[in-house]
Amino acid sequence: MKQILLLLASLCLIPGCAGYKLGAQKPAQLRHITKLAVPTFDNLTLEPRLAVLVTNAVIKQLQNHGSYQIVSRRDAEAVLEAKIQNIQRAQFRSDRNNILRTSQIQATINCFYTVKDLGSGAVLRNGASSAVSYMILDANMQLSETQLLEDLAQQLANPIAVELSEGW
């Protein structure tokens, strides 16, 4: 009797896992792409080295997802091209004693990207991404600014990699 109940219980659990698949679930348009080129993004802002920071962050995130092999353009099946449109800074918090003095800055960055098939030249995917980060002003303004830009690049790269790797 115990064996029959155990067998019935195990049979009930088997269909619950029937829909799962191992591995990446790429978007339908990108399913055939395995090798992706990611050239340095175009920087339409006046912020130096921002394009390199964002491009490197996107490459790292794509490698972490493991859906694509990042290769040079001549070896690739598709290319990810992007333009960093703007970066804006605004006062987020002021000093307690002087409301005209900023104590924390909010920065926002916007980027548009496309994935093109190198064989046919067709656009496989269009998208936009934006990110927000905060910086507390302290004595070393250059270090704070560098950390802000690195954080913005990471915040911007994650949704791009998720969109291309998982297709949600």
Image: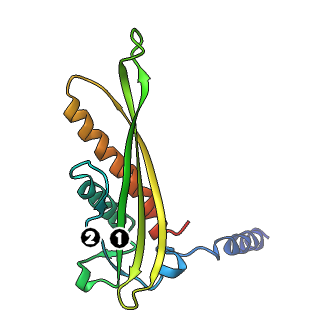
Find the residue positioned furthest to the right.
Answer: 1
Q: Is 101 left, or right, of 46 in this rendering?
A: right
Residue 158, quarter of the rendered image: bottom left
Q: Counting other residues with Cα less than 10 Å from the Cα at mark 2, is it few (<14), some (14-19), or many (20 or more)?
A: some
Along the line of sight, the residue nearer the viewer: 45 or 8: 45
Along the line of sight, the residue nearer the viewer: 66 or 147: 147
Q: Residue visible at 21% across and 34% down?
A: 143
Q: In the rendered structure, which amino acid carries the disc numbered 1? A: Glu
Q: In the rendered structure, which amino acid carries the disc numbered 2? A: Pro
SS at badge 2:
loop
Position above or below: 75 against 86 = below
Q: Residue visible at 37% across and 70% down?
A: 66
Estimate the spatial distance between the alpha carbons at disc 1 and disc 2, rounded to whole Å.
Answer: 7 Å
Residue 146 numbered mark, or none: none
SS at badge 1:
strand
Residue named by callout 2: 39
Residue 81 numbered mark, or none: 1
Q: Position of residue 36 (x, y in %)?
A: 33, 77
Q: Position of residue 140 (x, y in %)?
A: 20, 27
Q: Residue visible at 64% across and 76% down?
A: 18
Q: Position of residue 102 (x, y in %)?
A: 36, 22
Position above or below: 122 against 157 = below
Quadrant location of the N terminus?
bottom right
Position above or below: 22 against 142 = below
Quadrant location of the C terminus?
bottom right
- Cβ–Cβ under 8 Å for marks 1 and 2: yes
Q: Position of residue 32 (x, y in %)?
A: 44, 86
Chain-order first, disc 1 or disc 2: 2
Find the residue positioned furthest to the bottom.
Answer: 120
Residue 69, quarter of the rendered image: bottom left
- Total marks drawn? 2
In this picture the colour scheme is rainbow
